[in-house]
Amino acid sequence: MYDVAIIGGGPAGAAAGVRAAGKGLKTLLVEKKHFPRAKVCSGLIVGKTAQRAARQAFAGWPPDQLFHQNYRGFCLHVGAGPACTVDWPMPAFWRCELDQWMLEQAVKAGVEAFEGVEFVNFECCSNGYKVYCKTFGEERTFFARKIVGADGGFSRVRKRVYSGLKVFYACGYQEVMQGTAELAPEYIHVFTDKAFAPYYAALHFKQEKMVFEVGAPIKDYLHIRNWGLDLLKRHFGLCIQEVIFKRGCLEPLLYRQLFSGLPPLGRGGVLLAGDAAGLLAPGTGEGIGFALDSGAMAIDAFDQEKSDHLEAYLEMLGNIILTIKEAYQGVRAIRRAAEKDARELLESMATLLVYLINK
């Protein structure tokens, strides 16, 4: 019998594992992929919250062996027109390497981790939960007193707890390329247009490669991808020599549920963390800092004297949910500015970004 079973080995799961093992809890972590795994993510640790959360979660942060570049900040563009910079130094990693390092820290802390083991379901039993998994088609069963669902935006744990919850998704898309562009390499370049703001295309340089990304509704991502590449070729000298890989992911949009009186964050001895809980920044999709904090907080909530773990967890998440709520208002301000002129749109984008950096 484990004290806690963590489903998912990303930042939220690794942080939960380190916290649980640090409390002396017998901790299981199952991850359906084998690391290093592919992940659509810029690999940026953006904002004071994310950088502080990483330092608190992992001894030896930052992992110098994985560090590839320190960006000066963001350069925001409205098409080929007005642009402005938001200076904020931040480290950059390849996300597949970063996730592997975080999981290794959890194992060093004492977590028993199984890769290539897929969570299937759980059911209540007399002293906790029976956790059903499978690997290579064979069933595996574990017993745990508590569960942390940190299994990403398509969370099976969330689906099990909230079977009737209707979830909408946005699309994250990424292409890694060899090539050149006439853009300052010390900045992350973000491009939008009045027609579809706050959604965007972006380009940054990392380890002699270019990373092109899109954040958009599912129905619009291909249009914004093509718009972004055409803009970069016509006005910023983009020359693609080779596309190394393309990949995409879906990000859950649970903002309205989060702002309700009863957000879908868990029930009984099961709590959700990170993307599984919908803890993503509106407008940017950044979630590593929220994932690290919420993973650790979920473990702390199990320790509270309150019989209702969810109530304790909600109290701990109060500042995160408030930040997301205020950022959501910032996204609405961007939409209103897009109806006016490019300069106002640019200012509203910068305002949201500065807010998220400073939280």
Image (cartoon, rainbow, N blue to C red):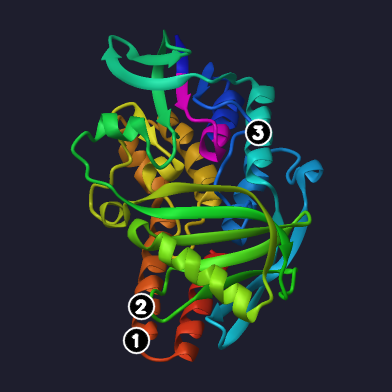
The answer to whether marks 1 and 2 mark residues whose Cβ atoms lie closer than 8 Å is yes
Numbered label attached to residue 45: none
Circle 3: residue type: Gln
- Label 1: which residue? 339
* Mark 3 and mark 1: Cα distance apart in space: 43 Å
**In the image, residue 312 lies at what x, y percent?**
36, 40
| First in sequence: mark 2 vs mark 3 | 3
Question: Which range is magenta?
Answer: 4-15
Circle 2: residue type: Arg
Between 179 and 98, which is closer to the camera in this rendering?
Answer: 179
Circle 1: residue type: Glu
- Name the residue located 52 percent from the left edge and 81 percent from the top edge: 79
- Label 2: which residue? 335
Q: Residues within 10 Å of mark 1 (few under 14, many from 20)?
A: few
- Label 3: which residue? 100
Q: Quadrant of residue 209?
A: bottom right
Looking at the image, residue 75 lies above or below residue 105: below
Q: Residue furthest front?
A: 241
Q: Tag 2, which secondary structure?
A: helix
- Name the residue located 40 percent from the left edge and 40 percent from the top edge: 276
